[in-house]
């Protein structure tokens, strides 16, 4: 399990914003002054590993020094969050709950509706987050693809599973045995954490269809600045435009052009953080007019792109 941060490591608001870029999470620090980027927000260990293909597990053992709020901003086929110690206030749409030790959450997210959380200060949090990508989840469900609607399902961790998770964190095995240990625990979390109705059939994909859809997604990911058309992308996928529109939505939880817009804005934001001018970031991301880019960026992130630009 690779160590991202050691036990004594302090994490500032700047650090958390960097983590947010990696994991698709937007952080806010309502109690910190705007010029306190180097002030510690939390302290502790964060681990990351890949138990199996299509699975990512992040384990945290941290002390919260300052309140911080988070909001996910990426679609997620299924994430399972287990709270071993500590608490947080979480919300998805109109659902709100007090997330405490011994509880777990199974979350499916559409890109437009993120999971919100508030972590109160002066507490220790020990938690694990297991995330599955769409192919891995589809494989686990025997080739069935679940609905892409956002959903939050809370459940209690079985005492036996909680003890095994505690043991794996406190006394992990070494080498290959460690990977097998965490793969087994991840499968147990998945078995207990399938939300009601998740295994209902919706859309089936053949291996060939997955490959052709991935061809389209990779094209959008690699060349967001190009003037893509639905007809050209459908030809790339060897599908009709209507079939591509329907199956892309089912596979990735968003439309073809919603995915393209998200990729363009992500690219532009990365360029702004690197010091590029707003006009340059807009053009590189495929926007012909900076005003259109500014409007789309503000709608997506809640602040104008000019607030990120810092001369390189």
Image (cartoon, rainbow, N blue to C red):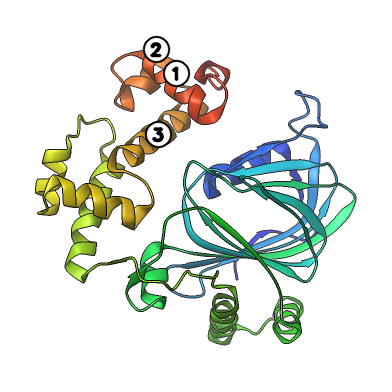
Residue 83 is situated, as x and y percent measured from the top left of the image, at 74, 66
Q: Secondary structure at mark 3?
A: helix
For the residue pair 107 and 181, the one nearer the viewer reads as: 107
At 73% from the left edge and 79% from the top edge, which residue is drawn? 162
Residue 262 is situated, as x and y percent measured from the top left of the image, at 40, 37
For the residue pair 292 and 149, the one nearer the viewer reads as: 149
138 versus 257 height, above or below: below
* Location of mark 3 (residue): 267
At 55% from the left edge and 80% from the top edge, which residue is drawn? 191
User: Would residue 9 be visible to someone looking at this image?
Assistant: no
Q: Quadrant of residue 133?
A: bottom left
Q: Secondary structure at mark 2?
A: helix
Q: Quadrant of residue 204?
A: bottom left
135 versus 119 height, above or below: below
Q: Could you say which disc has been placed on residue 291 in the image?
A: 2
- In primary-sequence order, the first of circles 3 and 1 is 3
95 versus 2 height, above or below: above
Residue 158 is situated, as x and y percent measured from the top left of the image, at 72, 82
Q: Could you say which disc has been placed on residue 295 in the image?
A: 1
């Amino acid at each position: 399990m690779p160590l991202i941060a050691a036990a004594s490591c302090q994490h500032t608001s700047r650090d958390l914003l960097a983590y947010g870029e990696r994991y698709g999470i937007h952080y806010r620090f309502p109690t910190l002054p705007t010029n306190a980027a180097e002030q510690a927000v939390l302290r502790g260990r964060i681990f990351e590993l890949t138990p199996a293909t299509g699975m990512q597990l992040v384990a945290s053992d941290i002390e919260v020094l300052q309140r911080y709020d988070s909001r996910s901003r990426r679609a997620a086929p299924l994430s399972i969050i287990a709270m071993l110690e500590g608490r947080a206030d979480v919300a998805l749409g109109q659902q709100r709950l007090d997330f405490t030790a011994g509880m777990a959450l199974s979350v499916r997210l559409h890109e437009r509706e993120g999971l919100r959380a508030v972590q109160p200060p002066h507490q220790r949090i020990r938690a694990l987050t297991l995330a599955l990508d769409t192919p891995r989840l589809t494989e686990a469900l025997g080739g069935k693809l679940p609905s892409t609607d956002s959903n939050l399902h809370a459940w209690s961790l079985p005492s036996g599973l909680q003890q095994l998770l505690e043991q794996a964190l406190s006394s992990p095995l070494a080498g290959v045995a460690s990977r097998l240990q965490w793969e087994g625990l991840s499968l147990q979390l998945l078995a207990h954490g399938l939300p009601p109705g998740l295994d209902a059939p919706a859309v089936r994909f053949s291996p060939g269809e997955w490959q052709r859809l991935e061809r389209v997604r990779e094209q959008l990911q690699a060349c967001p600045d190009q003037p893509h058309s639905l007809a050209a992308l459908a030809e790339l996928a060897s599908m009709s435009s209507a079939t591509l529109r329907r199956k892309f939505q089912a596979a990735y939880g968003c439309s073809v052009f919603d995915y393209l817009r998200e990729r363009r804005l992500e690219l532009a934001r990365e360029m702004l953080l690197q010091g590029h001018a707003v006009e340059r970031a807009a053009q590189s991301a495929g926007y012909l007019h900076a005003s259109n880019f500014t409007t789309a960026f503000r709608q997506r992130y809640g602040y104008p792109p000019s607030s990120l630009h810092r001369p390189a």
